[in-house]
Amino acid sequence: MPRSSRNRSKSAGPSTGRSLDFVAELSNDPESHRKSIYPGFMMNRFFSDQAQCQPCGRILFVDDDINLLESQKRTFVDRYDVITASCADDALQKLGRSSDISVVVSDIRMPDTDGIALLRQISQFYPDIVRIIFTGYVNLQNAMDAVNECQAFRILSKPCSTEKMKAALDAALSQSRLIQGQRELAVLRKYQHAMEGVILGFTKLVETRDPYTAGHQRKVSNLAAIIAQEMGLGLDCVAGIRLAGLVHDIGKVYVPVEFLNKAGKLSDIEFSIIKQHPLVGHEILSPIDFSWPLSRFVLEHHERLDGSGYPYGLSGDDISIEAKILAVADTVDAMTSNRPYRPALGIEAALREIEDNQSTHYAPEAVRACLTLFCEKGFRECLE
């Protein structure tokens, strides 16, 4: 929360114990710490994680006709990763040893266990594997069994042309990727719910120590997200900004409560400690593998376009757009809220502050979006 307008005396503040020691550790070599966060200033593990190669699934052909298996392998080896099994038991053993089989193509009539029984077991124990029947004995009963008992994806009759088989295998692999994507989405949703729970816990932790900022992070989060929407940013970016807003002041857990709630003037040393809260917030959040680089957004939310901000004096494009939006929302909510050292200054003063200092302190595009919300669309919800 901005406190730049608050007068500060030069008298030394009270002893702060562990909080001062922690901040001192972070401040001993700020340049090396800065480089550890900004290799080349703009590198971030989050962005590199997005470029992942999708592995190609394996296809298992099951048939008691060895010659047919060899023919299938020769035909499709250049296009797919093919393995074969000559009976149901062999197929189950290969499935047990391999975790990357995506499609099983099985004959029906085999000497030990027939293909329907095999695919029924695969359906039960490996439900994500796509199952295809490939048989010379296609009749209504076999078709019904394949669909009802095995949930077969395709039924192909022998003989089958190469092009028809390729089309079926391509479709099966696409189905496999769809199933895997649905599984991953379900896991991601569970992870997201857990992540949001962690963030809300952080939010409550800060607010229990500083009652004057109760609701501040929530209001900044909401306003920043709506500004981002007004700017036309994507849903994923808006979601990251919303979560970052909820924890942008988490670093204040290491600031002594008497500093946060002091009604009088802050000394230079007291204010210098408060200015470390973005850095402390980064240290707290960086070990957590969020879906967005929240620690970076938190670190930069007090940086300013002209380099006059803190903790590193970043400027221009070295500051993420998410942090620039948080800076505008943070300033507006801080100036319209009561603080122990002053009453609320009002929305007019807050909008005048960001408008007068756009292009020097605040990103013009974020300022324009904020002004549009309040001046043209009558927006007030986040300040209530």
Image (spheres, rainbow, N blue to C red):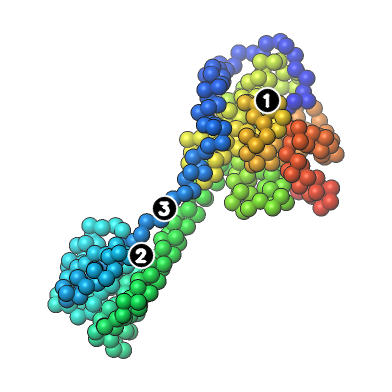
Left or right for 337, reference 122: right
Say which quadrant the C terminus sits in.
top right
Of the image marks 2 and 3, the number of the one nearer the N terminus: 3
Q: Amino acid at mark 2?
A: Asp
Say which quadrant the N terminus sits in.
top right
**For the residue carrying disc 3, how many other residues have a C-alpha within 10 Å: few (<14), some (14-19), or many (20+)?**
few
Tag nearer the camera, 3 or 1:
3
Tag nearer the camera, 1 or 2:
2
Instruction: Between residue 172 and residue 279, name the one nearer to us.
Output: 172
Against 171, residue 381 (above or below) is above
Left or right for 21, reference 336: left
Given the current orientation, which residue lies at the most extreme left position? 111
Left or right for 271, reference 124: right
SS at mark 2 in the image: loop
Tag nearer the camera, 2 or 3:
3
Instruction: Between residue 80 and residue 251, name the one nearer to us.
Output: 80
Q: Which residue is mark 2?
A: 128
Instruction: Between residue 235 and residue 21, name the one nearer to us.
Output: 235
Of the image marks 3 and 1, the number of the one nearer the N terminus: 3
Q: Which mark is residue 260?
A: 1
**For the residue carrying disc 1, how many other residues have a C-alpha within 10 Å: few (<14), some (14-19), or many (20+)?**
many
List x then y, in percent, for residue 301. 65, 34
Circles 3, 1 touching at the beta carbon (< 8 Å): no
State the image quarter where residue 200 is shown. Answer: top right
Q: Which residue is mark 3?
A: 53
List x then y, in percent, for residue 226. 70, 49
Given the current orientation, which residue lies at the most extreme top position? 11
State the image quarter where residue 314 is shown. Answer: top right
Distance from the alpha carbon under mark 1 to that under mark 2: 54 Å
